[in-house]
Image (cartoon, coloured by chain):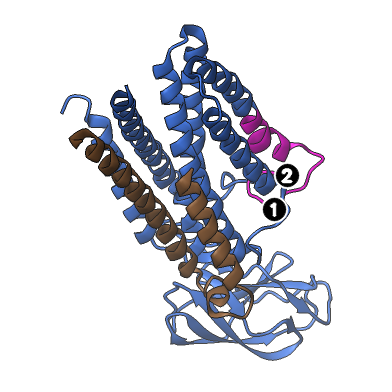
Chain colours: A blue, B brown
């Protein structure tokens, strides 16, 4: 098993992370409330939930300006649909009322009529906070596709790790004039480009479902595309020089510039204050760091990233061994 | 390089076909969006699979040369 442990680790990590990524349920949430506004008098709301467990005892209330109004009666249609009946009083404080069912608030407020100085005391208390289980956050528009975090993002981590390995070998090439180091650098770029392509395609699919288009002219997306072109140019450059020592030196120098540009295009430019970006973690957007359930994502995300990086390193090693054997045949 | 070009061409073919209103376009914006996750995992498995085949062919060619 000598020298094999990290390959076993790669498979184990990918297995565990992928099973968790696909099997951990999403936190329940409210998808829809049937009314857009509230006015004094009786009101019937149909609440649609996602992975909820509604029953007739589910507590439904309306929050308005720090006061609460409990439903006079609730009737569950099924686990994800609920009828709630309210006697809405006049004189609520705020023109936005929030519906809360089973401790979960619907993020779109209901426009409220006949404002006043507040409701009379009705004995309805604030809802108890939900107990937290190991669930992934349920975000509007993202829904189940939040699971792509464990597939799309590690592609880029693996690509950047491979390009890092490549630039390390390029520096050693320049230091030692070793053709072996140059071959290793090229193998890492080859495999890095496979992960780059997978990152671009999976990102485009995710963008289609979240932003509505496969490609937007976003700095992060264009930066990733330019990075891919820079590394394709590395392979073209390397393939166009016949003399192996000249090739090793030129490719080594180009690769150092390419890695600097990768860092600029993927990390620096999209984070400049002057540019706007849809992509999480850029242009003032948060990544997944400030979600209240972030740690549940991290527990699955980091093993997935490490697993994909190790798999990439393994693929790189295989490619390099094949290239070494080919060189031997050519001699 | 070849793998990259194959994947890019596949992707362009997908985009060309998956415009709004067509089944593929709709499937990616379905209600719970689980379809996107399936598509993403599928693309990754397919991509790694294509890489494996490319590697296999490379080794086969070398074996042939060795036998000569």
Contact check, label 1 and label 2, Cβ < 8 Å: yes
> Label 2 crowding class (10 Å Cα cut-off): few <14, some 14-19, many 20+?
many
- Work out whether mark 1 precedes mark 2 in sequence or the reverse, and give the earlier one: 1
- Find out whether residue A195 is within the magenta segment: no
Quarter of the figure with residue A319:
top left
| Residue A281 shown in magenta | yes
Q: Position of residue A236 (x, y in %)?
A: 56, 35
In the picture, which quadrant includes the C terminus of chain A?
top left
Q: Which residue lies furthest to the top in this view?
A: A176
Query: Looking at the image, can residue A294 be seen?
Result: no
Q: Residue furthest front?
A: B68
The numbered disc on residue A278 is 1
| Element carrying mark 1 | loop
Instruction: Write the residue at 60% across / 78% down.
Output: A32
Q: Which mark is residue A283?
A: 2
Q: Where is residue A211 in the image (x, y as percent from the top left)?
A: 66, 63
The subunit carrying tag 1 is A
Measured along the vertical axis of the image, is residue A92 above or below residue A262? below
Rendered position, A328 above or below A308: above
User: Which residue is at a point 15% across and 28% down the rendered structure image?
Assistant: A1
Q: In this view, does B37 lie to the left or right of A324?
A: right
- Viewer-proximal residue, A208 or A186? A186
Q: Can residue A80 be seen in this view?
A: yes
Q: What stretch is highlighted in magenta?
A: A261-284
**Secondary element type, mark 2:** loop
């Amino acid at each position: 098993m000598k020298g094999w442990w990290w390959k076993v680790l790669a498979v184990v990590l990918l297995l565990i992370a992928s099973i968790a990524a696909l099997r951990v349920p999403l936190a329940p949430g409210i998808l829809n409330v049937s009314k857009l506004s509230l006015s004094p008098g009786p009101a019937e709301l149909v609440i649609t939930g996602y992975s909820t467990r509604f029953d007739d005892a589910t507590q439904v209330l309306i929050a308005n300006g720090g006061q609460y109004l409990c439903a006079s009666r609730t009737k569950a249609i099924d686990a994800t649909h609920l009828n709630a009946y309210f006697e809405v009083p006049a004189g609520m404080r705020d023109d936005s009322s929030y519906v809360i069912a089973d401790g979960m608030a619907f993020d779109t407020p209901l426009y409220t009529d006949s404002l006043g100085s507040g409701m009379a005391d009705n004995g309805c208390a604030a809802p108890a906070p939900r107990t937290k289980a190991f669930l992934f956050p349920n975000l509007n528009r993202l829904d189940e596709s939040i699971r792509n975090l464990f597939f799309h993002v590690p592609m880029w981590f693996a690509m950047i790790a491979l390009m890092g390995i490549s630039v390390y070998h390029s520096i050693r090439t320049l230091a030692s004039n070793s053709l072996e180091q140059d071959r290793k650098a090229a193998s890492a770029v080859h495999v890095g480009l496979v992960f780059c392509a997978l990152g671009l395609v999976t990102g485009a699919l995710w963008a289609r479902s979240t932003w509505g288009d496969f490609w937007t002219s976003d700095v992060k997306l264009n930066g990733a595309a330019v990075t891919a072109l820079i590394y394709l140019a590395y392979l073209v450059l390397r393939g166009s020089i016949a003399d192996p020592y000249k090739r090793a030196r030129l490719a080594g120098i180009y690769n150092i510039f390419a890695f600097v540009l990768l860092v600029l295009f993927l990390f620096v430019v999209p984070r400049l204050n002057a540019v706007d970006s849809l992509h999480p973690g850029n242009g003032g957007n948060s990544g997944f760091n400030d979600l209240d359930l972030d740690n549940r994502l991290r527990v699955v995300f980091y093993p997935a990233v490490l697993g994909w990086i190790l798999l990439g390193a393994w693929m790189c090693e295989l490619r390099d061994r094949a290239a070494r054997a080919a060189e031997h045949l050519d001699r | 390089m070849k793998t990259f070009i194959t994947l890019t061409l596949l992707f362009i073919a997908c985009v060309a076909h998956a415009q709004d209103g067509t089944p593929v376009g709709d499937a990616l914006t379905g209600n719970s969006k689980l379809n996107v996750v399936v598509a993403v995992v599928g693309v990754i498995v397919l991509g790694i699979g294509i890489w494996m085949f490319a590697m296999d062919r490379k080794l086969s060619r070398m074996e042939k040369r060795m036998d000569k």
